[in-house]
Amino acid sequence: MVTRKHVSRRALLRGFGTAMALPVLDSMLPAMAAPARVAGKTPRRMAFVYVPNGIIMEDWTPATTGTAYEFPRIMKPLEPMRAKINVLTGLTHNTGRALGDGPGDHARAASTFLTGMHPRKTAGADISLGTSVDQIAARHIGKDTRFASLELGCEGGRQAGNCDSGYSCAYSNNISWRSATTPNPPEINPRLVFERMFGNADPNESAESRVRREQMNKSILDFVMEDTRKLQGGLGPTDKRKLDEYLTAVREIELRIANAERAAKEAGPLPAFEKPEGIPDNYAEHSQLMFDLMTIGFQADLTRVMTFMMAREGSNRPYREIGVSEGHHGLTHHRNNAEWVEKIKQINHYHSQQFAAWLKKLDSIRDGEASLLDNMMIVYGSGISDGNRHLHHDLPLVLAGGGAGSLKTGRHLLYPKETPMTNLFLAMLERMGVPEGSLGDSNGPLQHLSDLT
């Protein structure tokens, strides 16, 4: 594993059927590499985080453009990350509109979000959409990592049947599409995500088998302890610290998952909102676990492309932990009821808090000469702006991260009305080194992401 104090970029910690990836270490780069060459070794990564049912736009959209804008209430949690984000206003998904198909805006919102394609209206097996931007990127760069892409979520849903006015459930419950007929359903169970990353777990493993395995009462770090000791002996002080921080984070996630599983068994399912065993009842705990798993996945370069649905489109989950017992989707049809609007604002703000916490963590992790966030491009937003009227223009969007120096951040950018959101994806693919002439209804890469001209 270690030769002349140089660690292979593909080195793994192995033991008891476990193959555990490593974070990016200084010793993975040539000892005499010039700074520019070292910077070039740092991979660019992209992620897409989806929130459902639209946002109260008056408390989302900044009043002014440029760098001196004020953060409205819903975006306020993101203010500490001002220097690392761009707020984008004016982008549209025309393909999310009815275009003669009648009702079904929620199904169209999710399905068009990363594809820019209008879904075929059907509740049967003959679904048809298009390949999403994450999968286009994964096809080109996925060979360089253990997983071409990972798809996560916080709320499961059916993949067949009618979920929205004659549209298949597959449209509402997925934003990642491998092909026009094949969605990538998000995994919502943190345990299965963790074991996929580190334990080679079988998702079809029986309950009896899992009990026997867990009775060993060992951490995954115990299985790779011998390899870890060998590796640490050849590392310098900085790399030892990086490795220790990484292993500590892995162990912390492992313990949180175990505690969540134990609590779920003791508490049983929540009334009116049934969850699979092992998933935290508290939404913030669940979403932060998934965000932390994404962090580990990027930090260890297990993948460079991820999607995360913070809830499925049309979700009617309550958020009792912040005092909202009514279902989210139902509240969005508020008809200007001030009490309902206020509760939606609370939910929107709550989602922003979870996302902001993730950005802060990414920015705290060193990745080459910068932070993990600096080397990423992250889209956060919804396929609907006004949830009461089901609008698909002026979508609420944040582009976070520096794209390894390819993005100029800290700004609120206002684009001409009806600018296709797919133009943003073309610009992101360019920065990932992925040649793609068009995507969905795009008409050219989005401008002004690198400068003001």
Image: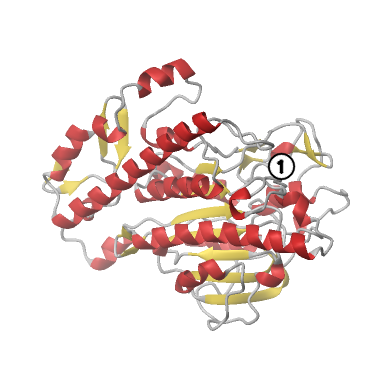
Q: Considering only vertical position in the picture, is 245 above or below 277?
A: below
Query: Coloring scheme of the render?
Result: secondary structure
Tell me the amino acid under the disc marked 1: Tyr
Relative vertical location of residue 291 with respect to residue 66 in this rendering, above or below: above
Give x and y (percent) for residue 105: 79, 51
Secondary structure beneath label 1: helix
Question: Among all residues in the image, which is located at the extreme top?
Answer: 208
- In front of the other: 64 or 14: 64
Q: Residues within 10 Å of mark 1 (few under 14, many from 20)?
A: many
Residue 7 seen in the figure? yes
- Left or right, 6 with respect to 423, comes to left
* Image location (x, y in percent) of residue 279: 52, 37
Q: Nearer the viewer, residue 320 or 368?
A: 320
| Residue 239 x/y as whole percent | 20, 53
- Residue drawn at the location 64% of the way across and 57% of the way down: 347
Q: Residue at x 26, y 40 (%)?
A: 11
Above-or-below relation of 438 to 85: above
Q: Quadrant of residue 128?
A: top right
* Residue 118 can be seen in this image: no
The one of 208 and 377 positioned closer to us in this rendering: 208
201 vs 37, left or right, is right
Residue at 40%, 64% in the rendered image = 374
Q: Quadrant of the C terminus?
A: bottom right
Residue underneath mark 1: 171
